[in-house]
Amino acid sequence: MNTATLLLLTRPATTSAPTGDAGFVEAEADAPHVNVMDLGVTRGDGFFETISVVDGHPQALEPHLKRLGHSAELMDMPAPDTDVWRRAVLAGIDAHQREHGVQREIFAKLIMTRGVEGTGIATGWVYLDTGEDFTASRLGIRVVSLDRGYRHDVAETSPWLLQGAKTLSYAANRAALREAARRGADDVIFVSSDGYALEGPTSNVIIRNGDRVRTPQTDQGILAGTTQAAVFEFFEARGIETSYEHIPARELAEADALWLVSSVRQASPITNLDGKDFHVDAALAAELNTYLLSRTH
Ligand code: PLP
């Protein structure tokens, strides 16, 4: 039995034909809905966002909606109708709460595809569900670095590779996580073929050296993280300097502390990278996660 709450978007894009409804309808999550010839299914041709919902509050909803639009732009797809997506997420949270009560942590997943081949009409849906339990990961994770196989300037030299768009083509990201598991690790930091630290398959990297916190600059074919932005706010409020930089991967080993951060997971301190142990400040990790989970917008 599927416990998800599902909303089908009748007006996902600003170019979609007008409909007499709110732009979305609630639907049965257990029933089939996606056409077998939808390009999202046959080619992974679409994009998505995953938003944490904590105590009924969607976190960083506006930055996520903005990034939805950015992915559409990079993929030459019609602009998502932001008002419809926003209303659908909020209505989905209400519907989920009616069914299951207010839960501490759930997530909303927003998916938009290029639609059924040949129609030129985008498909979109939102579902909300209880996520995986990240309690253990918030205490510490083991990570390996893996070559992503692209140079750090790939977004500029080869924009058709769509690095930096949150596309539905995450098979390679999942394969990287399986490789990490084969190497006895929980997660991955991708490194560019010319040696720069990039991001995780579903996360951004935060690097602390003393009173300085850095993350890889987002012009390197990586996502501008909504959680990373909140992590920077957390450190800035404590007088710590933050910056976006091109960071050679060898500098990872010299860090005082490293984290992988993303929606739903929040912040995972790294206990070991490529066999090297890192000290984890457990109190700081707890404080950071409490801060991230307390966000109401
Ligand atoms: N980078 C990639 C490739 C991701 O898939 C994600 C999230 O899933 C992130 C970074 C982190 O982004 P956010 O903090 O907005 O969830």
Image: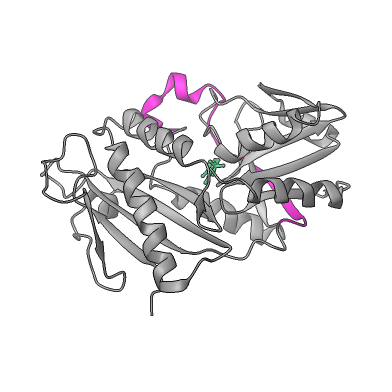
Lateral position of residue 271 relative to residue 193, left or right: right
Looking at the picture, how far across and down is residue 206, in whole percent? 71, 36
Residue 200 is a magenta residue: no
Picture layout, residue 233 above or below residue 286: above
Picture layout, residue 215 above or below residue 133: above
Does residue 264 show up?
A: yes
**Residue under the point 12% across and 47% down:** 19
**Residue under the point 35% across and 29% down:** 74
Residue 148 is a magenta residue: yes
Picture layout, residue 258 above or below residue 51: above
| The N terminus: image quadrant | bottom left
Magenta-tinted stretch: 138-163
Does residue 271 show up?
A: no
Lateral position of residue 260 relative to residue 41, left or right: right
Lateral position of residue 206 relative to residue 193, left or right: right
Looking at the picture, how far across and down is residue 55, in whole percent? 56, 58
Looking at the picture, how far across and down is residue 15, in whole percent? 16, 34
